[in-house]
Image (cartoon, rainbow, N blue to C red):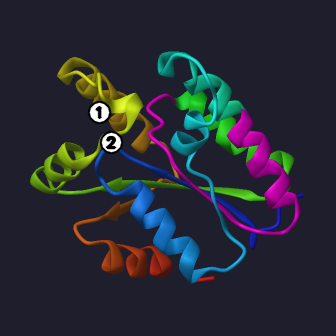
Amino acid sequence: MTRDDVRLILLNGLPGVGKSAVAAAWSARHPGTLDLDIDVVRTLISGDVRDTAEPARALGLAMAVEHLRGGHDVVVPQLVARTDQVRRFADAAARAGARLVHVVVEAPEDVVADRVAADAAPHRRDLRPTALAAYAGGLHEVAREPGVVRLANDEIAPAVERLEELLGGG
């Protein structure tokens, strides 16, 4: 049984579109929401950064399930460019009796370029144009799935307000 009032909100999009900023602003406006940035979880796992993505996602999904079971929303700012990976988020929401809300965040290319240039995250240091193009292609396919919500993010505050309108507020 799914409770429509408890949501796992996946903020999906390319690096630099503002997923993490929207997630933080959303969480600040919705007390009790877990802002689960899996990229932050990656920094908590020792070893080569290339080996931390899968363990961090698995740990993050387990954290999400527990928080959702407690009756609270979870917002996850994460690039997910494969449908099988989106399915993992949907399955986690279902295990907790919650619903997945998949939001693709988009921003103008010049805004994204500025944000990426200012970002020094370890897992993005080696992001090559070919990898970015592959992510963009995968994201395009994922975004065509039924029920995906699109969110323009040129500025954070208006984007959060639009997201609240799209999702019905609290």
Q: Residue at x 51, y 16 (%)?
A: 48
Instruction: Tell me the magenta residue range.
Output: 59-82
Name the outermost residue toward the front.
46
Q: Which mark is residue 23?
A: none
- Distance from the alpha carbon under mark 2 to that under mark 1: 7 Å
Q: Which residue is drawn at 44% across and 32% down?
A: 81
Estimate the x, y position of residue 1 in percent, counting from the top left. 90, 58
Question: Is 55 on the left or on the right of 19, as rendered?
Answer: right
Q: Residue at x 57, y 34 (%)?
A: 42
According to the image, label 2 marks what residue? 14
Indicate whether residue 79 is drawn in magenta: yes
Q: Label 1 is placed on what type of residue?
A: Ala
Q: Is residue 151 above or below residue 66?
A: below
Q: Please identify the quadrant where the C terminus is shown.
A: bottom right
Q: Label 2 is placed on what type of residue?
A: Leu
Q: Mark 2 packing: few (<14 Cα in 10 Å), some, or many (20+)?
A: many
Estimate the x, y position of residue 21 in percent, counting from the top left. 40, 63
Indicate whether residue 87 is drawn in magenta: no
**Res 117 → quadrant:** top left
On the question of residue 59 being in view, the answer is yes
Q: Mark 1 packing: few (<14 Cα in 10 Å), some, or many (20+)?
A: some
Q: Which mark is residue 136?
A: 1
Estimate the x, y position of residue 12 in percent, counting from the top left. 45, 48
Give the SS element for disc 2: loop
Number of the front mark, 2 or 1: 2
Estimate the x, y position of residue 134 in percent, counting from the top left. 30, 22
Give the SS element for disc 1: helix
Q: Which of 159 and 39 is in front in this view?
A: 39
Cβ–Cβ under 8 Å for marks 2 and 1: yes
Mark 2 or mark 1: whose residue is earlier in sequence = 2
